[in-house]
Amino acid sequence: MRFVDEFRDADKAHALAAKIAALCSPGREYKFMEVCGGHTHTIYKHGLEDYLPEAITLVHGPGCPVCVIPMGRIDDAMHLASRPDVIMTSFGDMMRVPGSNGSFFDAKAAGTDIRMVYSPLDSLKIARQNPDRHVVFMAIGFETTAPSTAMTMLRAHAEGLSNFSVFCNHVTIIPAIKAILDSPDLRLDGFIGPGHVSTVIGCRPYEFIARDYGKPVVVAGFEPLDILQSIYMLMLQLSQGRSEVENQYSRVVPWNGNLVALKAIAETMELRPYFEWRGLGFISHSALRVREKYAEMDAERLFSVPGVRVADPKACQCGEVLKGVLKPWECKVFGTACTPETPIGTCMVSPEGACAAYYNYGRMNRDRVPEAARAGRP
Amino acid sequence: MCLGIPGEVIEIHADQPDLAKVNVSGVKRLINIGLLSDDPPKPGEWVLIHVGFALSKIDEAEAAAAMAFLEGIGQAYEDEIAALRESLIE
């Protein structure tokens, strides 16, 4: 595949790893956070941590928009879906997220009309085909996905479609990064910056990280070589005493972002005063809701939802995993009570969650490597 | 799913210029290119696709520059290994 395969070459990976190792100061340790769930996924899938010297640790951040939705909001969505006049549409990654009473998948199996869609636009087709029902789209995602929801709403508006609305759970990345930076639990040396969020917001929003907190940021692509090159660029900045924002993913990310996308979001949505994030608590101005002007497409205005704040199950340590304080395998229920088939928390359920990534790709390495070492093999 | 994947634009829809047919690894589908209305893609150009929308054009010059950097790294590594192979340390 073009623009994919070239960035997976193993020889180049080894070469980059060598250059990274050469930049390590003796006796010093380095901690970089990759914010994006997609980056976590690539790191585990390709075993990138094995290429890095022991001095470098990668910490997984909260950039998984499914993972940060609190249980109460899932319950609200289920409440909407269970109305007989409603068809709920949702991306696949939401289907298995557990609420207080099961997931969308469980509800669907019990007869609730919940349909998986690839694109929010698919919801419009379902709405046109079912004029006697009301279609609610479960809108999730960071700024990467918000423009698509916005464009879908504008299209529905232009068509005069009256049986479509959005249950808006879009969140914004900068407040989450700021919460991490202000957290006393973590000491980070730099950030592997979000890839696709940056196609929309550009690279400027990260400048405060370099300028005010003195931490370098490199906006990275999603292939293994992209991530390794980004780590190399971070190490180069540190070794040269610089802290700047750099764009490794320049083939896709424009420095100024996508103005059309930002305008579409601004036209249809506005920031909520505050929003609850799983693991990070309440963060102000960190999520979006539908504007008054488009009230007829705001599921929260059209229907009432319980709006109850539900605490995470006692055993669940998703919050600490999302902040990067705990590694997946350090969670008490990882792999035992909490597995992809029987998930307790969102980090295990979402394909971009750190626990799911580790469970699917990383476990074998950790078990095998010490075994192999004990057996005397390299 | 929330992945962003590269696809090649084949043609713009005759009646709806907001839609384009793309080829993603052999799969041909219509996607919405409305987010690129400032600089719409032309057939043969590549775009990043996410949930049915093109988010960004893939800049071929930047991609080539990225590959050139990586090629340079790769070559330096191969040269190093070749030199090591030739070494006479004992």
Image (tube, rainbow, N blue to C red):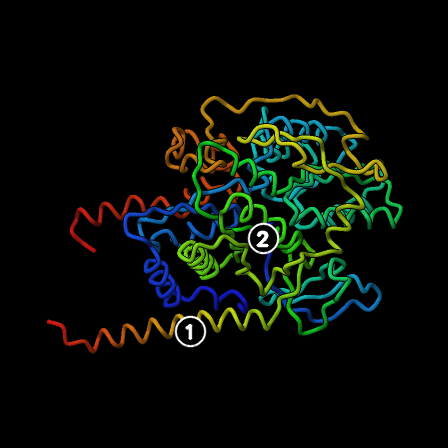
| Distance (Cα) linking label 1 and label 2 | 29 Å
Foreground label between 1 and 2: 1
State whether discs 1 and 2 lie on one chain. yes
Q: Are marks 1 and 2 in contact (CB under 8 Å)?
A: no
Point out residue B41 in the picture as x, y percentages from the top left corner: 72, 68
Work out which residue is located at the far bottom of the displayed protein and give it: B86
Label 1 Cα neighbours within 10 Å, binned few <14 / some 14-19 / many ≥20: some
Point out residue A188 in the picture as x, y percentages from the top left corner: 44, 42
Residue B38 sits above or below residue A103 on the image: below
> Looking at this view, is A148 or A255 the one in front?
A255
Work out which residue is located at the far left of the displayed protein and give it: B90
Picture residue at 77% right of the left edge, 45% below the top: A266
Asked whether the viewer can see residue B17, the reply is yes
Residue A239 sits above or below residue A295 on the image: below
The amino acid on which the numbered mark 1 sits, given as a three-letter code, is Gly
Picture residue at 70% right of the left edge, 56% below the top: A258
Write down the residue under mark 1: B72
Disc 1, SS = helix
Residue A237 picture quarter: bottom left
- Placement of the C terminus of chain A among the 4 image quadrants: bottom left
Q: Is residue A248 left or right of residue B48?
A: left
Asked whether the viewer can see residue B1, the reply is no
Going from N to C along the chain, the mark reached first, 1 or 2, is 2
Q: Is residue A76 left or right of residue A41?
A: right
Using the image, name the chain to which the residue with label 2 belongs: B
Picture residue at 46% right of the left edge, 70% below the top: B69
Write down the residue under mark 2: B3
Using the image, name the chain to which the residue with label 1 belongs: B
Point out residue A34 in the picture as x, y percentages from the top left corner: 48, 47
The amino acid on which the numbered mark 2 sits, given as a three-letter code, is Leu
Picture residue at 73% right of the left edge, 25% below the top: A305
Q: Is residue B53 left or right of residue A50?
A: right
